[in-house]
Amino acid sequence: MNSRAEAGDYLRNGTLPLHGTYEGFLEQLMIALLLANHVPQLLLFSSATAMHISFLAIFLEALSLARGSTEY
């Protein structure tokens, strides 16, 4: 995802990125984090949780590269 505007487009259109790919997983994660950051009522993640999710994303990327795949 390149910008917050894209996250807004996904929400307005009622669409989400493709499931089943590493890139789709990261885009959905980014949308959730942007929502939590900009809509206080939907505060889903604390900064500690966001950091753990970042480490998880790095781990998943390393794992998928080791397996030679971009699918998770």
Image (cartoon, rainbow, N blue to C red):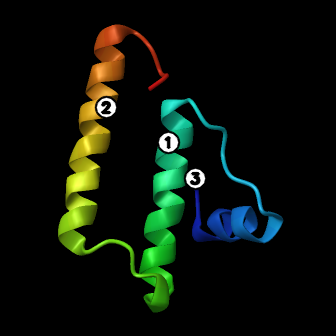
The span from disc 3 to disc 1 (Cα, nearest Å) is 11 Å
Amino acid on which disc 1 is placed: Phe
Amino acid on which disc 3 is placed: Met
Helix or strand or loop: what does disc 2 sit on?
A: helix
Q: Is residue 44 above or below residue 55?
A: below
Rendered image: mark on residue 62? none
Marks 3 and 2: CB-CB under 8 Å? no
Q: Specify few, some or many for label 1: CA neighbours under 10 Å numbering under 14, 14-19, or 20 or more.
A: some
Q: Is residue 25 above or below residue 48?
A: above
Mark closer to the observer (3, 2)? 2
Q: Which residue is mark 2?
A: 60
Q: Quadrant of residue 7?
A: bottom right
Helix or strand or loop: what does disc 3 sit on?
A: loop
Q: Position of residue 13 (x, y in %)?
A: 82, 64
The mark nearer the N terminus, 3 or 2, is 3
- Residue occupying the point 36% across, 20% down: 64
- Residue occupying the point 66% across, 39% down: 18
Number of marks in picture: 3
Q: Position of residue 8 (x, y in %)?
A: 68, 71
Helix or strand or loop: what does disc 1 sit on?
A: helix
The span from disc 2 to disc 1 (Cα, nearest Å) is 10 Å
- Residue occupying the point 75% across, 55% down: 15
Q: Which residue is mark 3?
A: 1
Q: Which residue is mark 1?
A: 25
- Residue occupying the point 59% across, 63% down: 3
Marks 2 and 1: CB-CB under 8 Å? yes
Q: Specify few, some or many for label 3: CA neighbours under 10 Å numbering under 14, 14-19, or 20 or more.
A: some
Q: In the picture provided, is 14 more to the left or to the right than 54?
A: right
Q: Is residue 18 above or below residue 52?
A: above
Q: Specify few, some or many for label 2: CA neighbours under 10 Å numbering under 14, 14-19, or 20 or more.
A: some
